[in-house]
C-alpha cells in the first residue's frame, strides 16, 4: 500500500513539479501587488503548462521520430524501435503555446508601460487609490 | 371540442388592429388637434362596428377564429371571438366611444399637457383590451395583458406630479409581478397539458393533478389575474392610480384594465380550470372567501374616503369582487350574474367617474365634503350620478339590480347563503357611501357656486347617455346587444363543457 | 471560381478577417481613412458568407471541412453545424452593425489610433469566429488567444483607467486560457486526440479515469472565466466601463457568448450530456452559480450611476440566464439559452450603442444626469432604448420574453421551481433599473432638481444616420425575433440539441 503510494508519487514527479510551478505562478498573479511581479507569476504559470505537455510526451530512452532515408539501407546502423519514438505533437503544440505566451507578455508589458506613464506607479493598491481619485463622477450611488 | 362552432374570419384581427393603426396617425397629426381627435373617434367607431358585426355569430354560438402566426413553437398567436370574448369586447369598445368624446372635453378643459401621448396610449390600451377579449390561448392572452400593462403606465403617470409618478411605480410593481405569476402559471399548465387553448369547461381534460399542485397553480393564476381584478390584498395599486386624469380612471379603472382582470378570472375559472376541477380541489372556496372579504372590506374603506375618486375606486374594488364571487359560485345563474355585472357595472361606474371628472373640471373640487349643493348648478350631471348610485346599491329599476339579482339566484342555486348575505350587506354599505353624496349635492346649501353652470357639453352628453343606458339595461337587459342572452349562453357552455 | 468559394465557405470566415486584419495596417498606413471601409466591407463579406453558411447547413446538414485537405484526426477540421453556423451569424451581424456605428465614434474618440484599432477589431472577430467554427481543441486555444490579445488592446484604448482594466483582464484571461490548455492536455494524454468528434468517440473507453474529470473541470473553469460566470466575473465591469464606446459595444454582445459557446460545446458535444449532468453534478453547480449571477448582477446594476457600468453588471446577470439554460441541461432550457445568445447580443449591442450616442451628443452617459431634454434631443435613440429595455425586462412580444419563457419551461421540466423564482426576481430588478431611466427621460417632475437649470427650449439634436441606423436595426431586431421566435427555434435552434439530452 505504502509502496504503491510512494511509487505513484515518485513515478509522477514531473507532474508534481509542474503542479508546484503552477501554484507558484497562480500565487504570483493573485497575491503580488506589483504588476511586474504579477507578470512574472504569469510567465511561470504558462511555463508550467508547457512543461506539463512536454513531460507527458517524454519517455525514458526515447528517441527522435525521424527516419533518414540514407540510414535505412546502411546495414551497420541500428534503427531505433518505433515504440521509443517520442510523440512530436505535444512539442509542436507547445511551440505555438510559447509563441502565444511571448505575445501575451508583450501586450502585458505594453499595458504596464502605459499604466506607468499615466499613474507613475505599478503598485496595485496605490493604483486603485489614484484611479478612485480621478474619477470625475462617482460611479455608484 | 368547444361547444362553440368555429369559423375563420379576419374581423377579430381587424378589431384589434384598428386602434393600433390609429396610433401612428395620432402621433403624426399631433400639431392638428381636431384631426388628431378625429382619428381617435374614427377608430373607436370602426372598432365598435367590427365588434358588433361579430355579435350575431356569437349569439348563434359560433366563434370567429383568426390565427395570425406561430408565436411560440406549437402555439399560435390566435384570436378567437367566442361569445364571452364578444361580450367583453362589446362593452370595452362601446364605452371607448363615449370616453373618447369625454376625453376631448376633459383634456381641453383641464388643459392637460402631452395630449398626443395621452390619446396614443389610450388607443394602444384599447387594442390590448380587445386582444385580451379575443385571445384564444394563454400565450396570446399574456402578450396582450402585458401590452395593456405597459400602455396604461403613461396614462397613470400622465400628470407627472410626484404623486402620479409614485402611483405609476406602484402600478408597475403590482402589474409586472402579476404578469410574471401569469407566465409561471401558463408555463406550468403547458408543462402538464401540452396545450394552452382556452376551452369552455376547462382545458385540463384528463390530465391528473396532485391536489397540492392544483391549489398552487390556481394561486399562481390568481396572483396573475387578481391584481388587475383588484382582489384583496392585491388591490392597493388601484386607489393610488386614481392620480391619473379622470377619463383614464373612468375607462381604464372602471372598464378596460380592471375588467380585463375579472374577465381573466372568469377565463381561468371557466375556461382553464373548469367548474369540475374548481369544485374537486376546493378552489371555489378559496376564490369565494377572497371575493367575500374583498367586497365587505372595500365597502367599509370606501365609507371613510373623502376624496370622491378614491371612494369610487374602493367601490370599484368591491364591485369587481361581485363578479369574482359570481364565478366562484360555479352555478349557471352565478356566471350569468357575474358576466352581466361586467357590463352593467361598467356603464354605472363610468358614469360616476365621468361625473367626478366633470365636477373637477367645472368646479375644481375633488372632495365629497365640498360637494354641498352642486346638484342645483349641475342638475344633469348629478342626476346621472344619482342613477349610477342607485344602480350600484342594487335597487331597481337600474341595471345593477339585474346583475345582483342573478348573483343572488346563483348563491341560492349553489345552496350557499353566505354569499347571499354578503351581497345584501354590501348593498347596504353601497347605499351608505353613495346616498350621502346625492343628499348633500341636492339638499344642502353650497358655497361659492354663484355663476357656475353645467360642465362642458362634450362631457355632459356622454354622462347622460351612459346613465340612460344604465337605466335602459335595468328595465330591459336584452336591449340592443342581448347581453342577457349572451351571458346565459356562455354560462351554459362553461357548465356544459366540463 | 464560384464552386471554389462555395466549397470553402467554412474557412472563408476566419480567412477574410485574418487577411483584412493584416491588410489594414499595410494599406491604411498612409491614408488612415481607408481603415474603416476595409473593416466594414470585410465584415459585410463575412456576414454574406455566414448567411450562406446558415442556409447551407439548414439545407444540406452539417459540413465538415478539412483544413488543407488533411484528414482528421491528424488535420484540423472545421465543423459547420447548426450551432456554430448560428453563433457565427449572430456574432458577425452584430459586429457589422456596431462597425457601422463605429465610424464616427472612433473618428472622434480615437482619431490617431484608427488604423491599429480597426485592425484589432477585425483580428478579434477572426479569433471569435475561429473559436466557434473549429472542431479541434488545440486550434480553439490558438483562436482564443488571438481574440484575447486583440481584446486587451481594444479595451486599453479607452479612458485613462482602461489599461489597468485591460491588465486585469489579461491576467484573468491568461489564467482562463491556461486552464483550458491544461484541460486539453489531460484529455490528450488519455485519448491521444485533439479532434472533438474523435475525442468524443474515444472517451467512453477511458471515462472512469480521474484525469478525464480533471480535464473537464479545468476546461469548464477556464471557460467560466471567459464567459464571466459568477464568481469569475471580476474582470468584466471595469473592462466594459473604461473601454472605448465601440469596444464595449462589440465585446459585450460577442465576447462572453463565445465563452458560453465553448463551454456548451465542450460539455455537451465532447464529454456528452450524460457524463456532465448525470455522472457528475457539474451542470447543477453551473446552474446554481448562474442563479447567483442573475441576482447579483441585477442588484449591482441597480446601484450604478454610470450607464456603461450598469450595462456591464446587467451583462453578468444575462450571462447567468445563458448559464442557467446550459446548467438545466434539458432541451427547452437549452433552446432558451441559445435563443438568449441571440437576444442578448442584440439587446446589449443596442443598449451600448445608445450609451455611445449619449456620450457622443451629451458628453456623458451618467444615468443620474439624464433629463427629459434627452428625449427631446434624441427621440429615436430613446425609442430604441425603450424597446431594448422592455425586452430586457422580458415583456411580450419582445424577444426577451420568449427566452425567459423557454427557460421557465426548462426549469419546470427539471421541477426546479426555485430557478423560476430567481428569473422572476431578476425580471423585477431589471424593471427597476430600466424604468428608473425611462422615468427620468420621459417625464419632467414638477419638483425642480437642485443644481439643474431648467432647459425649456430644447432643439432636436439626434445623432447622424450612420449611428442611428444600427441602433434602430438592433431594436427592430428584438421585435422581429420576438414575433418570429417560433420560426427561429424550429428552423435552426431545434437542431442544436445534443444527442442524449
Image: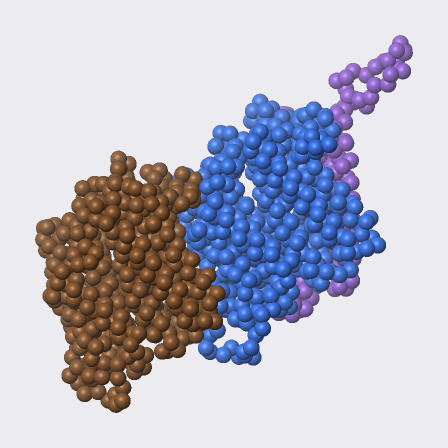
- Give me the residue at 44% from left, 65% from top: B26
Residue in the foreground of this view, choosing between B19 and C121: B19
Residue in the foreground of this view, choosing between A121 and B447: B447
Q: Is residue B175 above or below residue B279?
A: below
Residue in the foreground of this view, choosing between A78 and C273: C273
Left or right: C347, with B347 as reference point: right
> Residue A31, position in %: x, y?
67, 52
Q: Is residue C309 above or below residue B277?
A: below
- Give me the residue at 20% from left, 61% from top: B344
Outermost residue toward the top in this view: A75
Residue B9 appears anywhere in the view: yes
- Give me the residue at 72% from left, 41% from top: C16
> Residue B317, position in %: x, y?
25, 64
Task: State the quadrant of the N terminus of chain C.
Answer: top right
Residue B145 appears anywhere in the view: no
Q: Is residue B325 above or below residue A46?
A: below
Q: Chain in purple?
A: A
> Residue C323, position in %: x, y?
52, 44
How many numbered marks, from 0 up? 0
Q: Chain in brown?
A: B
Q: How did the renderer colour the structure?
A: by chain
Res. B315 image quadrant: bottom left
Q: Chain in blue?
A: C
Left or right: C453, with B141 as reference point: right
- Give me the residue at 69% from left, 60% from top: C104
> Residue C406, position in %: x, y?
44, 43
Amino acid at each position: 500500500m505504502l509502496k504503491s503510494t510512494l511509487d505513484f508519487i515518485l513515478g509522477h514527479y514531473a507532474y508534481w513539479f509542474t503542479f508546484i510551478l503552477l501554484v507558484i505562478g497562480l500565487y504570483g498573479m493573485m497575491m503580488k501587488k506589483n504588476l511586474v511581479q504579477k507578470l512574472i507569476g504569469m510567465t511561470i504559470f504558462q511555463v508550467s503548462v508547457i512543461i506539463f505537455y512536454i513531460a507527458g510526451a517524454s519517455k525514458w530512452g526515447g528517441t527522435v521520430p525521424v527516419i533518414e532515408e540514407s540510414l535505412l539501407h546502411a546495414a551497420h546502423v541500428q534503427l531505433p524501435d518505433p515504440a521509443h519514438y517520442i510523440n512530436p505533437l505535444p512539442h509542436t503544440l507547445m511551440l505555438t503555446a510559447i509563441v502565444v505566451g511571448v505575445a501575451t507578455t508583450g501586450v502585458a508589458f505594453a499595458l504596464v508601460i502605459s499604466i506607468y506613464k499615466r499613474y507613475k506607479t505599478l503598485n496595485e493598491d496605490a493604483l486603485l487609490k489614484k484611479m478612485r481619485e480621478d474619477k470625475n463622477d462617482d460611479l455608484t450611488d | 371540442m368547444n361547444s362553440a362552432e368555429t369559423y375563420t374570419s379576419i374581423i377579430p384581427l381587424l378589431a384589434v388592429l384598428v386602434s393600433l393603426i390609429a396610433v401612428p396617425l395620432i402621433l403624426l397629426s399631433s400639431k392638428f388637434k381636431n384631426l388628431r381627435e378625429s382619428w381617435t373617434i374614427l377608430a373607436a367607431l370602426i372598432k365598435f362596428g367590427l365588434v358588433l358585426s361579430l355579435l350575431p355569430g356569437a349569439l348563434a354560438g359560433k366563434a370567429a377564429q383568426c390565427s395570425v402566426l406561430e408565436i411560440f413553437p406549437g402555439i399560435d398567436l390566435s384570436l378567437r371571438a367566442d361569445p364571452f370574448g364578444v361580450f367583453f369586447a362589446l362593452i370595452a369598445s362601446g364605452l371607448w366611444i363615449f370616453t373618447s368624446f369625454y376625453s376631448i372635453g376633459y383634456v381641453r378643459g383641464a388643459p392637460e399637457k402631452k395630449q398626443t401621448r395621452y390619446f396614443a396610449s389610450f388607443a394602444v390600451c384599447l387594442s390590448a383590451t380587445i386582444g385580451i377579449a379575443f385571445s384564444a390561448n394563454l400565450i396570446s392572452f399574456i402578450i396582450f395583458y402585458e401590452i395593456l400593462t405597459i400602455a396604461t403606465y403613461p396614462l397613470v403617470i400622465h400628470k407627472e406630479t410626484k404623486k402620479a409618478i409614485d402611483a405609476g411605480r406602484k402600478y408597475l410593481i403590482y402589474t409586472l409581478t402579476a404578469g410574471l405569476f401569469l407566465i409561471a402559471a401558463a408555463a406550468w399548465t403547458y408543462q402538464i397539458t401540452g396545450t394552452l387553448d382556452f376551452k369552455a369547461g376547462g382545458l385540463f381534460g384528463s390530465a391528473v393533478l396532485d391536489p397540492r399542485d392544483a391549489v398552487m397553480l390556481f394561486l399562481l393564476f390568481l396572483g396573475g389575474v387578481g391584481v388587475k381584478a383588484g382582489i384583496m390584498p392585491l388591490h392597493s395599486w388601484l386607489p393610488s392610480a386614481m392620480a391619473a386624469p379622470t377619463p383614464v380612471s373612468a375607462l381604464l379603472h372602471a372598464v378596460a384594465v380592471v375588467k380585463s382582470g375579472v374577465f381573466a378570472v372568469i377565463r381561468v375559472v371557466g375556461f382553464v380550470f373548469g367548474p369540475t376541477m374548481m369544485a374537486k380541489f376546493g378552489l371555489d372556496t378559496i376564490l369565494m372567501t377572497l371575493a367575500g372579504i374583498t367586497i365587505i372590506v372595500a365597502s367599509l374603506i370606501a365609507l371613510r374616503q373623502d376624496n370622491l375618486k378614491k371612494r369610487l375606486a374602493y367601490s370599484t374594488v368591491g364591485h369587481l369582487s361581485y363578479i369574482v364571487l359570481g364565478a366562484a359560485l360555479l352555478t349557471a345563474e352565478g356566471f350569468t350574474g357575474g358576466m352581466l355585472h361586467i357590463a352593467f357595472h361598467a356603464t354605472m361606474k363610468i358614469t360616476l367617474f365621468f361625473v367626478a371628472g366633470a365636477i373637477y373640471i367645472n368646479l375644481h373640487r375633488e372632495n365629497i365634503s365640498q360637494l354641498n349643493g352642486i346638484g342645483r348648478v349641475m342638475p344633469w350631471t348629478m342626476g346621472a350620478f344619482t342613477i349610477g348610485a342607485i344602480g350600484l346599491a342594487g335597487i331597481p329599476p337600474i341595471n345593477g339590480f339585474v346583475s345582483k339579482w342573478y348573483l343572488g339566484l346563483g348563491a341560492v342555486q349553489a345552496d350557499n347563503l353566505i354569499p347571499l348575505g354578503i351581497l345584501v350587506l354590501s348593498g347596504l354599505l353601497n347605499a351608505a357611501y353613495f346616498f350621502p353624496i346625492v343628499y348633500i349635492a341636492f339638499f344642502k346649501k353650497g358655497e361659492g357656486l354663484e355663476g357656475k353652470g353645467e360642465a362642458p357639453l362634450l362631457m355632459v352628453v356622454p354622462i347622460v347617455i351612459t346613465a340612460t343606458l344604465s337605466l335602459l339595461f335595468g328595465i330591459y337587459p336584452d336591449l340592443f346587444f342581448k347581453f342577457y342572452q349572451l351571458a346565459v349562453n356562455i354560462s351554459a357552455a362553461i357548465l356544459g363543457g366540463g | 471560381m464560384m464552386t471554389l468559394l462555395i466549397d470553402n465557405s467554412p474557412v472563408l470566415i476566419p480567412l477574410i478577417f485574418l487577411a483584412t486584419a493584416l491588410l489594414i495596417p499595410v494599406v491604411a498606413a498612409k491614408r488612415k481613412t481607408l481603415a474603416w471601409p476595409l473593416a466594414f466591407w470585410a465584415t459585410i463579406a463575412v456576414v454574406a458568407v455566414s448567411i450562406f453558411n446558415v442556409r447551407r447547413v439548414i439545407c444540406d446538414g452539417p459540413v465538415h471541412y478539412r483544413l488543407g485537405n488533411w484528414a482528421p484526426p491528424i488535420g484540423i477540421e472545421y465543423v459547420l453545424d447548426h450551432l456554430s453556423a448560428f453563433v457565427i451569424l449572430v456574432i458577425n451581424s452584430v459586429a457589422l452593425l456596431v462597425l457601422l456605428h463605429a465610424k464616427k465614434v472612433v473618428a472622434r474618440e480615437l482619431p490617431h489610433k484608427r488604423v491599429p484599432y480597426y485592425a484589432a477589431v477585425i483580428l478579434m472577430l477572426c479569433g471569435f469566429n475561429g473559436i466557434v467554427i473549429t472542431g479541434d481543441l488545440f486550434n480553439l486555444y490558438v483562436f482564443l488567444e488571438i481574440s484575447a490579445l486583440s481584446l486587451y488592446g481594444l479595451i486599453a484604448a479607452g479612458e485613462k483607467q482602461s489599461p489597468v482594466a485591460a491588465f486585469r483582464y489579461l491576467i484573468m484571461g491568461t489564467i482562463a486560457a491556461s486552464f483550458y490548455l491544461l484541460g486539453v492536455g489531460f484529455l490528450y494524454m488519455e485519448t491521444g486526440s485533439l479532434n472533438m468528434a474523435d475525442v468524443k468517440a474515444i472517451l467512453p473507453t477511458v471515462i472512469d479515469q480521474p484525469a478525464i474529470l480533471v480535464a473537464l473541470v479545468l476546461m469548464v473553469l477556464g471557460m467560466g472565466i471567459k464567459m464571466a460566470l459568477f464568481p469569475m466575473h471580476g474582470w468584466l465591469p471595469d473592462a466594459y466601463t473604461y473601454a472605448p464606446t465601440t469596444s464595449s459595444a462589440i465585446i459585450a454582445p460577442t465576447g462572453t457568448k463565445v465563452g458560453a459557446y465553448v463551454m456548451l460545446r465542450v460539455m455537451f458535444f465532447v464529454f456528452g450530456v450524460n457524463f456532465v449532468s448525470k455522472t457528475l453534478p457539474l451542470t447543477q453547480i453551473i446552474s446554481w452559480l448562474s442563479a447567483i449571477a442573475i441576482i447579483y448582477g441585477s442588484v449591482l446594476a441597480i446601484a450604478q450611476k454610470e450607464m456603461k457600468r450598469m450595462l456591464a453588471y446587467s451583462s453578468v446577470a444575462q450571462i447567468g440566464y445563458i448559464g442557467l439554460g446550459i446548467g438545466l441541461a434539458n432541451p427547452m432550457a437549452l433552446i432558451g439559452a441559445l435563443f438568449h445568445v441571440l437576444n442578448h447580443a442584440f439587446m446589449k449591442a443596442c443598449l451600448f450603442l445608445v450609451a455611445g450616442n449619449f456620450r457622443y451628443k451629451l458628453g456623458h452617459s451618467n444615468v443620474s444626469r439624464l433629463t427629459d431634454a434627452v428625449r427631446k434631443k434624441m427621440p429615436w435613440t430613446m425609442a430604441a432604448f425603450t424597446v431594448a429595455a422592455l425586452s430586457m425586462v422580458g415583456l411580450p412580444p419582445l424577444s426577451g420574453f420568449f427566452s425567459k419563457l423557454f427557460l421557465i419551461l426548462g426549469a419546470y421540466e427539471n421541477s426546479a421551481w426555485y430557478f423560476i423564482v430567481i428569473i422572476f426576481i431578476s425580471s423585477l430588478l431589471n424593471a427597476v433599473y430600466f424604468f428608473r431611466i425611462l422615468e427620468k427621460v420621459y417625464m419632467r417632475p414638477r419638483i425642480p432638481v437642485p443644481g439643474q437649470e431648467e432647459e425649456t427650449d430644447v432643439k432636436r439634436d439626434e445623432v447622424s444616420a450612420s449611428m442611428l441606423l444600427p441602433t434602430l436595426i438592433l431594436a427592430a431586431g428584438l421585435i422581429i425575433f420576438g414575433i418570429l421566435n417560433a420560426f427561429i427555434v424550429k428552423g435552426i435552434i431545434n437542431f442544436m440539441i445534443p444527442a442524449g439530452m
